[in-house]
Amino acid sequence: MESLPPEREIRCDAGDQSSEGQPRKPEALNAKSESGQDDRAMCSSLDIYTDHFALSERPFSLLPDPDFLYWSASHQRAYTMLEYGILTRAPITVITGEVGTGKTTLLHHLLKSVSDDVTVGLIANAHGDRGELLRWVLMALNQPAPAEMNYVDLFSAFQSFLIEEYARGHRVILIFDEAQNLSAESLEELRMFTNINSNKDELLQLVLVGQPELRDIIHRPEMRQFAQRVASSFHLTVMGAKTVGKYISHRLYVAGAERNLFSTTAMKLIHDATGGVPRLVNQLCDLSMVYAFTRGNQSITRHTVQQVLDDGSFFASSFDEGGNSP
């Protein structure tokens, strides 16, 4: 595993203890240097506790990172269905899951593994009427879509691109992230795109990834034709308590830890507070490590996690399962 860049000269482990040998107080994070600069502020948030815990990088970043992907049983099955859809040239593949369950991370892993004969267009948060949808698609494929082009011109350019790629021995896959934001009309438009073919070969595959609302839209009676084109699908579920423990251990190991820094009771509380949603697990683990760091502790106990929750630092804990503030 690569270590932190050598140009990082500012260290964040200075002052782990006071001159009396006592653990650092949280307010020490705001201490000023003689030059008047905030030494702690100069430390990247990525480095705030990595030296203290002997880590090579921050293990619980909220950014999707396929290098940290933990292959839970649910994620393995979801990725298998993604691969199955692509390898069998399924017209439409649908992957859904609650917010923060790792859908985008799976996509990033998929993008790293596609072969050179596959042309991929990734579209996130597409919206608008059918003409605007086509512009999103063309731009994702690095094709021009000037404002003066009408729908007929845009569709002609898109069809020509698909045929040209097919002639080169390439197949085109359009991946829509946050696809629950697409209207039923937009989904029907995408279905029509899959009708572009060359004899028995389909020139386009669609991968739709989104929240459970996407499944609700597809299950509407008027979406029957679209649903019949879905040849591969899977719904990602949240993690159980045992899986959360393995997930935490895995991410720490990838970040360079030689042991699990979280106690068993701490991990149980993290599961209970987050509902097993990976993104929330990351957030609460990260905050708990910051709390342990400020106290000079080398491990994260249930008491530390509970302190984060009691202080209200873990903002997600103020919402119920429906996403509403109590």
Image (tube, rainbow, N blue to C red):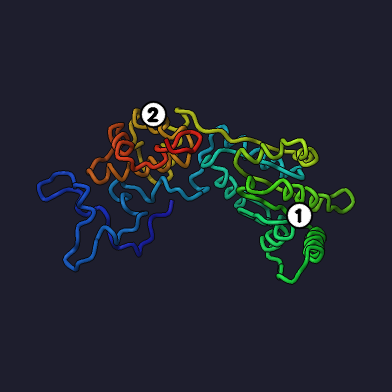
Question: Mark on residue 187?
Answer: none
How far across and how far down the image is residue 186, in percent? Answer: 72, 50
Q: Is the residue 32 above or below the residue 260 in the image? A: below
**What's the CA distance linking mark 2 and mark 1?**
46 Å
Q: Is the residue 111 above or below the residue 146 in the image? A: above
Query: Counting other residues with Cα less than 10 Å from the Cα at mark 2, is it few (<14), some (14-19), or many (20 or more)?
Result: some
Q: Residue at 74% across / 49% down in the picture?
A: 185
Question: Mark on residue 268?
Answer: 2
- Most distant residue in the right direction: 199
At label 2, which amino acid type do we have? Lys
- Most distant residue in the front direction: 326
Residue 168 is at least partly visible in this image:
no
Badge count? 2
Question: Which residue occupies the foreground of this view, 192 or 25?
Answer: 192
Q: Is the residue 232 above or below the residue 63 in the image? A: above
Identify residue for label 1: 171
As helix, strand or loop, the secondary structure at mark 2 comes to helix
The answer to whether the residues at label 2 and label 1 have Cβ atoms under 8 Å apart is no
At label 1, which amino acid type do we have? Arg
How far across and how far down the image is residue 228, in percent? Answer: 79, 38
Q: Residue at 74% across / 60% down in the picture?
A: 131
Q: Residue 288 appears in which quarter of the rendering?
A: top left
Closer to the chain start, of discs 2 and 1, is 1
Q: Residue at 32% across / 43% down in the picture?
A: 289
Q: Residue at 53% across / 48% down in the picture?
A: 66
Rendered-image quadrant of the C terminus: top left
Horizontal side of residue 49 vs 277, given as left or right: left
Horizontal side of residue 104 vs 268, given as left or right: right
